[in-house]
Image: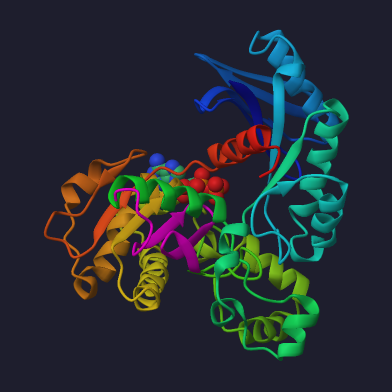
Amino acid sequence: MAKVMAVNAGSSSLKYKLYEMPEEKVLCSGNVERIGHEDGIFGIKFGSENIKITQPILDHSRGVELVLEALIKYGIIKSLDEIECVGHRVVQGGKYFSKSAEFDQHNADLIESMTPLDPLHAPAHITGWKAFKAALPEVPAIAVFDTSFHQTMEPEDYLYPIPYEMSEKYDCRRYGAHGTSHNYLANLAIEHYFGGKAEGSRILSCHIGSGASLCAIRDGKCVATTMGLTPLGGVMMGTRTGDLDPSVMDYLCTCTGKDVHEMYDIFNKKSGLLGVSGISNDTRDVEEAAEKGNKRAILTSKLFARRVADFIGQYYVRLGGIDLIIFSAGIGENSAYFRKAILEDVQEALGLKIDYELNAKVRGREEILSTPDSKIKVVVIPTDEEVMIARDCYKRITNGAI
Ligand code: ADP
């Protein structure tokens, strides 16, 4: 038995989950929020307890201290020596990482060097790593990348049709994201629906949360994914546009007098469900308004579903057919309304037969939504990115490498 910590450090937050491996038992989990503020929030859940304490948390180091103190204070572990590995989620692994890696100084420098590709997360990942390293200097740390699952894409799938020299010189290409989730979903689906045999399987994984991406997976490996150079690309999301004609940027800058950075911020934070509906980035609010007959909300739902449906069609061709479609993440797991809107858009072309009565009841649990006569099986599977981090930590402990 070994205890490992899965960490997801953001710019002002730090999510964590302590596991006992190989049982994959969650001993506790929590979130440190509003780091950098006098009214920071420290949260921890274990057993039936759900504790939240508001206090000054001025930097990530203080956040990590609070987490480690709480593990002892609440009797979750007796000594910090029990933690054998810390696994950090890292969004961008660029061209350097096709699998998880030791989080040492060399790799930290590489991750930091990719900050231009991920200005939002890369500095936070480094800060989180440093804070844990200072508190647990002898404990090995690993980095688990959102992009590594997508490194099996072929150049035809990851290159943009820009001058080739620019792709090469600036590493400007599709990297994708949510790879840890797509990998988890593919592994589980292969176990549950393909008798554990990856060869020959054609899976379309739809991770649809506030960030959303689709991934075409053949033989258990990614062949194509919707997110691009950054998580702004692909399908429409909570606040992000997804793919656009690039001239929209130039045109709107000219129309509004805003510069590229301001417009980029609008594409990232004020578009998608929020921008089109003018109501919310949360599907629950949009759904409620649509059900009351709000026209913009209805249009938003249709637009959202259509963007996902278009990619399902594209990936049906890319995979040469699909055996299994997976819905996952906040919307995919919980919103019967949005699942139905998407499935209705593709069912005729793909020969899907869906039990919509069952669909209406499924929330946050694994379930087959298609009927036995459907040409493609459609399932809901809750995702679990943290357990993938814990599994790589365990590999690191038992093999000495990943
Ligand atoms: P993130 O990308 O932040 O990890 P999640 O996968 O947690 O996002 O998805 C969050 C989104 O999922 C919410 O913004 C909301 O749109 C949707 N969502 C979550 N729970 C429900 C629910 N019970 N019903 C409908 N939609 C939900």
Residue 19: % across, % down:
58, 26
Q: Is residue 240 left or right of residue 305?
A: right
Q: Residue at x 52, y 53 (%)?
A: 210
Depth check: give the residue in front, 356 or 179.
179
Is residue 241 among the parts visible in the rendering?
no
**310 with respect to 351 (left or right):** right
Q: Quadrant of the C terminus?
A: top right
**Where 203 sits versus 257, above or below?**
above
Q: Quadrant of the N terminus?
A: top right
In the rendered view, how is the structure colored? rainbow
Residue 347, quarter of the rendered image? bottom left
Q: Is residue 173 left or right of residue 261?
A: left
Question: Picture coordinates of residue 282 (x, y %)?
Answer: 48, 50
Say which residue appears at 43% left-offset and 49% top-offset: 187
Q: Nearer the viewer, residue 394 or 273?
A: 394
Image height of 232 relative to 156, above or below: above
Residues shaded magenta: 195-223
The image shows residue 48 at horizontal and vertical percentages of 49, 13
Residue 265 appears anywhere in the view: yes
Q: Give the farthest residue toward the bottom.
A: 163
Name which quarter of the figure residue 400 lies in.
top right
Image-based side of 242 in relation to 353, left or right? right
